Each structure stands twice: as C-alpha cells, then as structure tokens.
Image (tube, rainbow, N blue to C red):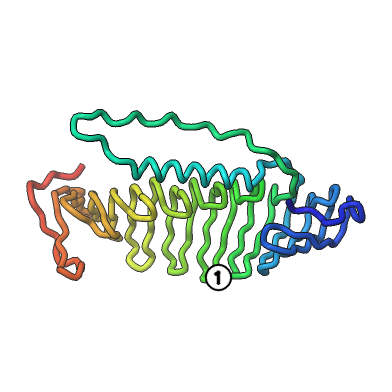
Amino acid sequence: SLRHPHPESIARGPATAEMADEEGPCEWEGELDDGFPTGQGTMKYPNGDTYEGQYAKLEVDDPAAVAAYEAEKAEKEAAAAEAEPPADGEDPAPAPEPEAPPEFPKITTSLRHGTGKYTFASGVVYEGDYVEGKKQGAGVMTFPDGGKYEGAFDKDCMAGEGVFNYPSGDVYSGAFAGNKKSGVGSYMFKASQSQFIGEWEDGEFKRGEWVLSNGTSWKGEFEGGKPVGEGVQTFGRTGNQQPATYEYADDGTMTALKFSGTIRAGA
C-alpha cells in the first residue's frame, strides 16, 4: 500500500514526502489525505521514472490475494491441458464450468487515477488517462526513436482504435489488442506509398488487400507480410479483375505474379 510511513506526522495538505511502493522508496510532492497521495502532484520512483498527474485514495482488491488466485487458476488450466485424452470409444470428460472470481479482501492504497504524464527512465512518455494505477482510456505514447501511438488503452496496453506513426514514416490506423495490431486496420508504407488494408492478428497482416500507389491491388491471404495462395488482382487503370498468384524463390524473394482464369471487366 502506497502511504506515508508516519501519516500522523503529516496526514493532510501539501507536502514533499518519502514513502515506498512494491518497487522501493518513492518521493511524492503534492497533497496527502491520511498519509495517502491524493490529487495533483509529482511522484518520483526508485527506477528513475517520474509521474506528474492525479493520484487517488482508493479501496482496491488486495494484489497478493489476486495474484494467488491467478496462480492457482493457471495451475488448474495447465493440469487440464496435460490430462490424458479419453480412450477409444470413451466420451471426453465434460468441460468444467467457468469459475466466478471470489470476493477478494480490500486494501486502502493510493494509485494513479485520472489524467497524468508518465516519463520512463528509458525516454518513453505516456500522457493520458489512468484508472486504478493502469493506463486506461485515451492516451498518447511517444518513443525515443520518434515513434508515436495515439489512441485507446486498456489495462496498460494499446487496445482498441488507435494510430501508430513509425520512425520510418509508415502509419498504421486501426484496431489494437495487447500492444499489437489486431482486428481491422490499414498500414501505409511511406517508401512505396502502398497500403495493407484488412484484418490483422497478433501484429501480422493476415487477409485483405495490398493497394499499390497506382491503384492496382491484390486481394487474398498473407503470411509474413507477403501474399500467399491465389488471390484477385484488380488493375487500377481499368478496374478489370483476374485471379493471380505471387511466386517466390527459395530465399523468399518475390519473383513473379502468375495470372490464371478469365478477366472480369471492371465497373
């Protein structure tokens, strides 16, 4: 629990106070409520990170109890995954009913809650919303290499709709999950002025359309950022369409585009 070790000595009001969180001693400059950082202030962490923004005194689930529950749950799931499969002719065991999380004991603590700016010692900077100590809501994260993400966050991760500007000048706009491109989105390559438009999974483009700068496009499945299998080529100038397959050398270099089937006139 983040609290001044001697709240009776400086329980309320503005102060500069040393206290400790789970990582070590911190220094808070701002308001205190019963020894808990509250309201607007600045927190300096032992690893060199700094937060400028809002803190709140909150009742939250005891982190130790939550961690113990999650560990036990993971052990049960691992044991179930390693269980022997049913013998021939036997019906598989019914899947266990999902367990509702228990009521965890509560603790009083102080957490980042509201809006603020968090500067990591590495040079990464986050500005935006916090809920119970985690990046949650709308925010902007900038990186030392010039990269920048602006969009939605969920439980400290880029999640939901957002835009990522890469140092190369490339831009991705679309859905994220767990800090990775996931869902529907478009990626613009600055160097070639081409785009991937479609569905992403775990950071990889999986299916959709590769649109070239002249308007010609190929639509189909992708692996490792490359078209795979048969797709449909649409010619930018005429709108005509024809089945087509990209061919590759043994080293993965794209060597040819092979057309098949009949040409369908564009609109």
Is residue 217 left or right of 169 when viewed as pictured?
Answer: left
Residue that appears at 68% across and 42% down = 60
Residue that appears at 21% across and 48% down = 239
The amino acid at mark 1 is Pro
The image quadrant where one finds the C terminus is top left
Residue that appears at 67% across and 61% down = 23
Dot 1 crowding, Cα within 10 Å, few <14, some 14–19, many 20+: few
Nearest the eye: 140 or 78: 78
Identify the secondary structure beneath mark 1: loop
Q: Please, is residue 236 above or below residue 94 in the view?
A: below
Is residue 142 left or right of 202 when viewed as pictured?
Answer: right
Is residue 106 left or right of 124 when viewed as pictured?
Answer: right
Q: Position of residue 183 (x, y in %)?
A: 39, 46
Q: Position of residue 34 (x, y in %)?
A: 85, 48
Nearest the eye: 43 or 20: 20
Nearest the eye: 209 or 107: 107
Quadrant of the image occupied by residue 42: bottom right
Q: Which residue is mark 1?
A: 144
